[in-house]
């Protein structure tokens, strides 16, 4: 089995000047495609179950799916809870076999965010798992506005929570379908100067490939979360599969045709982060 924790894959990434892909999962087809891409690229991969995924599929099922894929993979696979909402949900994820917990307290006042995230970090570490937190607030395209990460707050957050990774807000947005308005590199450098915790970019689909590559090689950003561009690849492949034969109704046959295009899209993400050949 190559089941890994987030810390297991982020430490080598920081040392080696690359970033690990955190790939947002919605179902069996994309999970399998992501692991196939990681195998083909000889790269570590983080399989992420976010709130939408968890609303559709129960945590114990997701944990079993992630662990099954990891058990049959020869590269490190992290089973990651993304945007966990409570200590109880994080505990349930550990019980379901997840190896990494991201608790999202970014909407809370700083003191409350630190206290809640620290509790999740203690829970995770006691179970041999990892913990990611968020400081600042990463907004949503067409929705909630971001609040940029304050470097001094980031230093305190990293020091007092004990997290293994820290998601930051430097102009990145969730759910972008194209290039965003650009990242605040000056803010990133100030955060790096204030803390030695591995950094994470949520909303990585809005960061151009060239910028991802540069930051993966030259900053403390050790994980980019990528979801929207891979969902777009899945949607395009699904529409093509349905249109190819309008009389076809076998869902397995239709969905099978999404896996090669999504695998190819995930391989491009992995290569763009410099993660190929690292496993």
Image (tube, helix red, strand yellow):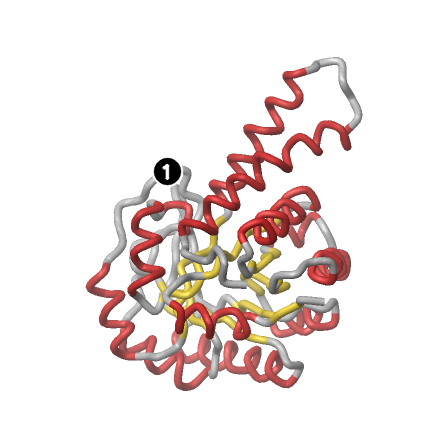
Q: Along the line of sight, which residue is nearer the eye, 236 or 96?
A: 236
Q: Classify mark 1: helix, strand or loop.
A: loop
Expressed as whole percent of the image width and height from the top left, the position of residue 120 reads 57, 78
Residue at 48 percent of width and 82 percent of height = 115
Q: Along the line of sight, which residue is nearer the eye, 59 or 197?
A: 197
Using the image, determine if residue 23 lies above or below residue 93: above
Residue at 57 percent of width and 39 percent of height = 262
Q: Along the line of sight, which residue is nearer the eye, 108 or 204?
A: 204
Q: Is residue 223 left or right of residue 64?
A: left
Residue 251, quarter of the rendered image: top right
Residue at 52 percent of width and 74 percent of height = 7
| Crowdedness near tag 1: few (<14), some (14–19) or many (≥20) residues, C-alpha within 10 Å | few
> Among all residues in the image, which is located at the extreme right?
250
* Residue bearing the label numbered 1: 178
| Quadrant of the rendering where the N terminus is positioned | bottom right
Expressed as whole percent of the image width and height from the top left, the position of residue 154 reads 34, 75
Expressed as whole percent of the image width and height from the top left, the position of residue 244 reads 65, 16
Expressed as whole percent of the image width and height from the top left, the position of residue 113 reads 45, 75
| Quadrant of the rendering where the C terminus is positioned | bottom right
> Among all residues in the image, which is located at the extreme front?
277
Residue at 54 percent of width and 67 percent of height = 102
> Among all residues in the image, which is located at the extreme left?
186
Using the image, determine if residue 47 lies above or below residue 219: above
């Amino acid at each position: 089995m190559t089941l890994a924790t987030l810390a297991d894959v982020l430490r080598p990434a920081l040392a080696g000047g690359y970033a690990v892909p955190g790939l947002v999962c919605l179902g069996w087809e994309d999970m399998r495609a992501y692991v196939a891409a990681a195998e083909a690229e000889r790269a570590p991969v983080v399989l992420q179950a976010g709130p939408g995924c968890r609303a559709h599929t129960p945590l114990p099922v997701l944990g079993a799916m992630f662990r099954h894929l990891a058990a049959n993979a020869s590269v490190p696979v992290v089973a990651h809870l993304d945007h966990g909402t409570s200590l109880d949900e994080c505990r349930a994820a550990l019980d379901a076999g997840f190896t990494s917990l991201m608790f999202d307290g970014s909407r809370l006042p700083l003191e409350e965010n630190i206290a809640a995230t620290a509790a999740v970090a203690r829970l995770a570490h006691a179970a041999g798992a990892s913990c990611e937190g968020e400081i600042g607030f990463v907004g949503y395209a067409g929705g909630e506005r971001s609040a940029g990460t304050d470097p001094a707050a980031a230093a305190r957050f990293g020091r007092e929570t004990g997290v293994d990774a820290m998601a930051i807000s430097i102009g990145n947005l969730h759910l972008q379908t194209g290039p965003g308005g650009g990242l605040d590199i000056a803010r990133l450098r100030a955060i790096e100067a204030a803390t030695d915790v591995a950094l994470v970019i949520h909303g990585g689909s809005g960061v151009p490939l060239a910028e991802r590559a540069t930051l993966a090689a030259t900053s403390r950003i050790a994980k980019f979360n990528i979801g929207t561009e891979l969902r777009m690849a899945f949607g395009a492949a699904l529409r093509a599969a349905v249109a190819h034969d309008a009389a076809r109704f076998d869902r397995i046959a239709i969905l099978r045709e999404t896996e090669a295009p999504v695998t190819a899209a995930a391989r491009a993400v992995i290569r763009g982060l410099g993660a190929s050949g690292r496993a």
